[in-house]
Image: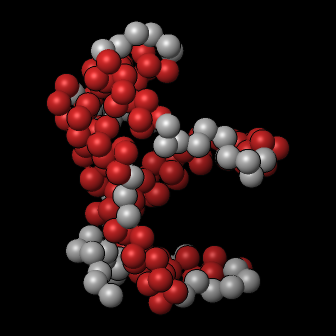
Amino acid sequence: MKIPERYKINTTSFSYYWTKGIGVKLLDKLPNKPNLADADQYIPLLYQYDEACDRLVEHLHLKIGFTKGQQLIRDYLQGKAIESIYDKLISDFMNTLTIEPQWLDWQKVQQGIALSQRSGLTGLIVLRDYCLMGGYESSAINKPLIFTGALKKVPSNA
């Protein structure tokens, strides 16, 4: 099996966290221990991508800019008239989306929202300072972040 170049096993901070750091205590609480070898079955998924979204980005955001592209999408969603070339491009993309899958259980969604809000500011700090920064170590997430232009913006005072 050919492995994509962007597939890298993190052997730095995360490795230490799960083998010698406080992650060891977390693993002790899990009924089943994760096995890194089991993740290999998902490597082929790294070759999959959203063709309709890539087409939208290529023909909309990269040609007229992210801000203007997003405004056109907002206008489309609000039912405002937009140029036919963009209308078709956006509608083709929107037709690939499932807005609300049949299996969606709104009660569970509300429970998840309530649970995530229980941590308050502390949870946001953990998300910002550990999870997000750790996520930046993943090259797989960098491409979408770079294309949105979000990395060029001034950080908020979160």
In percent of the image, x 59 and y 48: which residue is there? 123
| Residue 53 visible here | yes
Q: Position of residue 42 (x, y in %)?
A: 46, 77
Q: Nearer the viewer, residue 147 or 54?
A: 54
Please name whichever residue, 34 or 100, is drawn nearer the observer in this view of the structure: 100
Residue visible at 34% across and 68% down in the picture? 47
Is the N terminus in the top left, top right, bottom left or bottom right quadrant?
Answer: bottom left
Q: Is residue 11 left or right of residue 128?
A: left
Identify the residue at image location x=55%, y=76%. 22
Image coordinates of residue 54 in percent, x first then y, are 31, 46
Q: Count the numbered circles shown.
A: 0
Q: Quadrant of residue 141?
A: bottom left
Please name whichever residue, 132 or 64, is drawn nearer the observer in this view of the structure.
64
Residue 75 vs 154, above or below: the answer is above
Seen from the viewer's position, the closer of residues 146 and 41 is 41
Colouring of the image: secondary structure
In the orientation shown, which residue stands out farthest toward the top?
81
Apparent side of residue 31 relative to residue 48 in the rendered image (left or right): right
Position of residue 54 relative to residue 39, above or below, is above
Q: What is the residue that sits farthest to the right in this orientation? A: 107
Location of the C terminus by quadrant is top left
Q: Residue at x 45, y 58 (%)?
A: 130
Horizontal arrangement in the rendering, residue 66 relative to residue 108 (left or right): left
